[in-house]
Amino acid sequence: MKIKQVTPFILHVPVTGSQIADSTHSITHWGVVGARIDTDNGLSGFGFTGTHAHLPSDQLIARCIATCHAPLLAGEDAHDVQRLWTKLARNPALQWIGRAGITTLAHAALDVALWDLKAKAAGVPLWKLLGGQVRERVRAYNTDIGWLSIADDKLVDGARRAVQEGFSGIKIKVGSTVERDLRRLEAVRKAIGPDVTLAVDGNGKWDLATCLRFCRGAEPFDVYWFEEPLWHDDVKGHAQLARATTIPVALGEQLYTQDAFIEFFHQEAIHWVQPDVTRMGGLTEVLRVCEAAHAYRLPVAPHAGDMSQVHVHLSYAHPAVQVLEYIPWIKDCFTDSAEVHDGFFRVPQQPGAGTTPTARAVQQYAKAVA
């Protein structure tokens, strides 16, 4: 299965409603910057990374795929996923210009495409290729009802509606003011009752003092985790917070390497591990993080399930994964979409990773690659 051609693509897909915001970002579209890998046996694999649909930035990622990575893959055997991951990640020229950011996002799209190809060649869904189904169901938690841009009354209504639809987990955004966020947290907890898990996500906005003040007020509401409470690379601060509150600390969507996670593990600065295949150079590195987390007896909750179809396969195949995020912006852009029924993700059935874009999605959302 020799690689013949690598072609980047860009999709910009509208978010729920007209616009959403968390503590640090406001967006109208989600960017899907991807790669198609064609092989000499007629199979094509697809992978992608996720962005805030900023076209100049997306063009840089697409150009990195086409000009930096594609030449390294030409003529290679697409089955050799692990070797090709190392070839791209440890290329001296690419290491020199970055071990995170654009080069890693571009690498993620290609690594996922290779896993998609490998599963298609085997004629099985990716979760079977990864070792088979380790759990009967994967529980979904709904983040799409919890944005900071949603008015208080609409937030409560959305949380209540999500529970009625079968979700047993809710996550809301924080990072405005401690007072407002605590009012919203209390209102949501009252609306959904004590049996639904309720997490919060700060997107790295606050400093340690603010986080401590928030946690003191939030502890009575049985918070499932506090996600990205501090700046993403602040290991010491997360360790201090983890020791100071009963609320578990979650993070990982902004970490790019296994080494970054390991430092958080060593410092006991994390309780929930949240890697993202679209950030970490693909599934290959995320699998290493999941294995390390499992060794530390730490649960994994991959970041943004529906913004990365591969996470559904990972969640069914890896014993460390406990729960998966539901954000439905791009799920219908793929031929094997990440569907939730009665609060649980459907087991994927089609061969591959579920990352093949539909013709309709390409027609509606494609942007030209410069």
Image: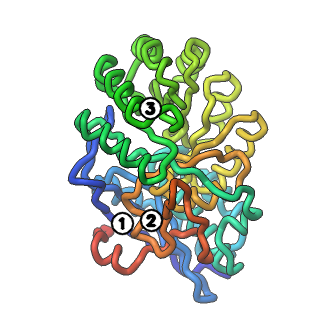
Dot 1 or dot 3, earlier in sequence: 1
Screen quadrant of the C terminus? bottom left
Circle 3: element type: strand
- What separation in Å lies between label 3 and label 2 (alpha carbons)? 30 Å
Residue type highlighted by circle 1? Ile
Q: What's the residue at 75%, 64% (across, down)?
A: 132
Q: In this picture, is 104 found above or below 124?
A: above
Q: What's the residue at 36%, 21% (across, down)?
A: 182
Residue type highlighted by circle 3? Val
Q: What's the residue at 51%, 45% (across, down)?
A: 168
Front residue of 310/279: it is 310
- What separation in Å lies between label 2 and label 1 (alpha carbons)? 6 Å
The image's colouring method is rainbow
Q: Position of residue 48 (x, y in %)?
A: 47, 62
**Is disc 1 surrounded by few (<14), some (14 to 19) or many (20+) residues within 10 Å?**
many
Q: Is residue 353 left or right of residue 213?
A: right
Q: Position of residue 44 (x, y in %)?
A: 55, 80
Q: Which mark is residue 34?
A: 2
Do the residues under discs 2 and 1 have CB atoms within 8 angstroms?
yes
Query: On the image, numbered disc 1 is attached to which residue?
Result: 10
Query: On the image, numbered disc 3 is attached to which residue?
Result: 200
